[in-house]
Image: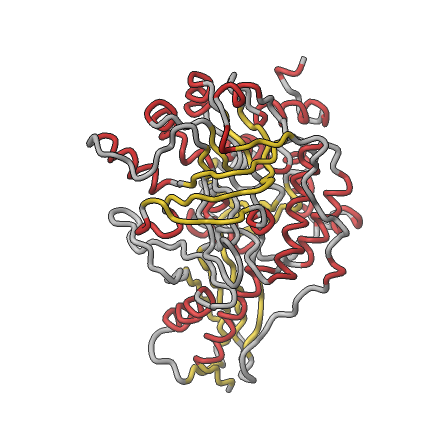
Amino acid sequence: MTVIRQDDLIESVAAALQFISYYHPRDYIEHLARAYDGEQSTAAKDAIAQILTNSRMCAEGHRPLCQDTGIVNVFLKVGMGVRFEGFGGSLADAIDEGVRRGYLDPSNTLRASVVADPQFERRNTGDNTPAVVNVELVPGDTVEVTVAAKGGGSENKSKLAMLNPSDSVVDWVLKTVPTMGAGWCPPGMLGIGIGGTAEKAMLMAKESLMEPVDMFDLLARGPSNELEKLRIELYEKVNALGIGAQGLGGLTTVLDVKIAMYPTHAASKPVAMIPNCAATRHAHFVLDGSGPAFCEPPPLSAWPDVRWTPDVRTSKRVDLDTLTREEVASWKPGQTLLLSGKMLTGRDAAHKRIQDMLARGEKLPVDFGGRVIYYVGPVDPVRDEAVGPAGPTTSTRMDKFTDMMLSQTGLLAMVGKAERGPVAIDAIRRHKAAYLMAVGGAAYLVSKSIRSARVLGFADLGMEAIYEFEVRDMPVTVAVDAAGTSVHETGPREWQARIGRIPVASAS
């Protein structure tokens, strides 16, 4: 009988979480490199270059791939011949201790993103516990463990439909993916669960994302069964939508599509879909009683020789400290800017508090007049960093606050990730403001442009506080200009028409 000790499980989970915070899986890197080589969209190719450069920097610097270091998901297959020893509490308690140690490691402190109360106080637990744990008892005398960290941007795009038995899964996916926007940071993967019950379909979708990325191998050898045929069909047709990297329009939206199935009720066809973002983070290890398990890092040769730097020839330099509404109005959709000077930060919690203070007629702790706000919740700094990885968060969450910020605070422009919805775009157009997009999945790279950081307001909100960043040549793209033109609408439409596999009604 194999004896699994508590300390070995704790140490293994902690090490795995550190590992996946800064190492992409090798298969993902290789597939992304091939997508980069084949990409024809200039904007999408630049975004992929930033993601690849960021990935190498994180591997070398042992810092997080993304500022959103995720909520921890742990899948355990426990052999029935295993005996647990030295456990002071439950299996979940031991895993949570591993999460705690992994996230509080002083050499690479990760961002605490978990709130204990999802409905009322939403108080941050401070150490990213508890994890979401799934346990399966199986034959054998080992414990197989898969550890994943799932960011909010991708998790929030999860979809579930209870289809009729005769309904087309392909049609549903092609109808649904465009509604997900780009907040899940493509290019990534789609995990699809078909069958079982509602909760089983969702679990299968998530577990399928932990499988190796092998689409290029599958395309090379051809499908051997109906399931592989379906994977290829979905891969080709989703990419034909033209959404592209970061939703800017391009050839590659997904690198792979994974599908898991389970028997279901005769009257049902549950279908779940969960994306994995560009910060693909998961690892697999086995405990066999011999001690803790540690993951093997990919060699640096796995990364392509892509080293993105700001293009000062084609990008316009912008001084944030002297920015005017007239200059904002002159920016064009798709134009690349390099921002220097002081900017403010703020996310959901800060915006909600600002809203409440304005409603009560209270003075805000920060003057937003003539300023730019960056939607970010940064990782705490280590060593000589001004701030930890500080990539953009999904901007649509701030859409409902946009008119308030533009009309009542004098804000000039916003920086975030992915698209804006119609409410925000309308407010931007009416107030002659602008929305700028930074690349999701390039958090460490972006942080290198931040020279200093200090908290100006709402310090109790932790990473959601209002910071002031001083930046130098921070790269952004004009995603919505003062006239309300959105590149996340025009780019995919253009590239869908170019690809030509799926008709585009407005492209004639």
Q: Which residue is drawn at 47% across and 29% down?
A: 413
Image side of residue 282 versus residue 122, left or right: right
Q: Residue at x 76, y 60 (%)?
A: 301
Nearer the observer, 469 or 258: 469
**Compared with residue 77, is residue 279 higher up or lower down, i.e. above or below?**
above
Percent across and percent down for residue 480 are: 53, 25
Which residue of the protein is positioned furthest toward the top in this rendering?
508
Percent across and percent down for residue 271 are: 50, 42
> Looking at the image, what colour scheme do you see?
secondary structure
Percent across and percent down for residue 192 are: 55, 46
Percent across and percent down for residue 361 are: 21, 30
Quarter in which the C terminus is drawn: top right
Which residue of the protein is positioned furthest toward the bottom in this rendering?
1
Nearer the observer, 153 or 63: 63
Could one spot residue 191 in this view of the protein? Answer: no
Nearer the observer, 52 or 342: 342
**Compared with residue 472, is residue 336 higher up or lower down, i.e. above or below?**
above
Q: Which residue is drawn at 35% across and 34% down?
A: 367
Image side of residue 103 versus residue 244, left or right: left
Which residue of the protein is positioned furthest toward the left in this rendering?
360
Nearer the observer, 353 or 158: 353
**Compared with residue 172, is residue 112 higher up or lower down, i.e. above or below?**
below
Could one spot residue 394 in this view of the protein? Answer: yes
The quadrant in which residue 233 appears is top right
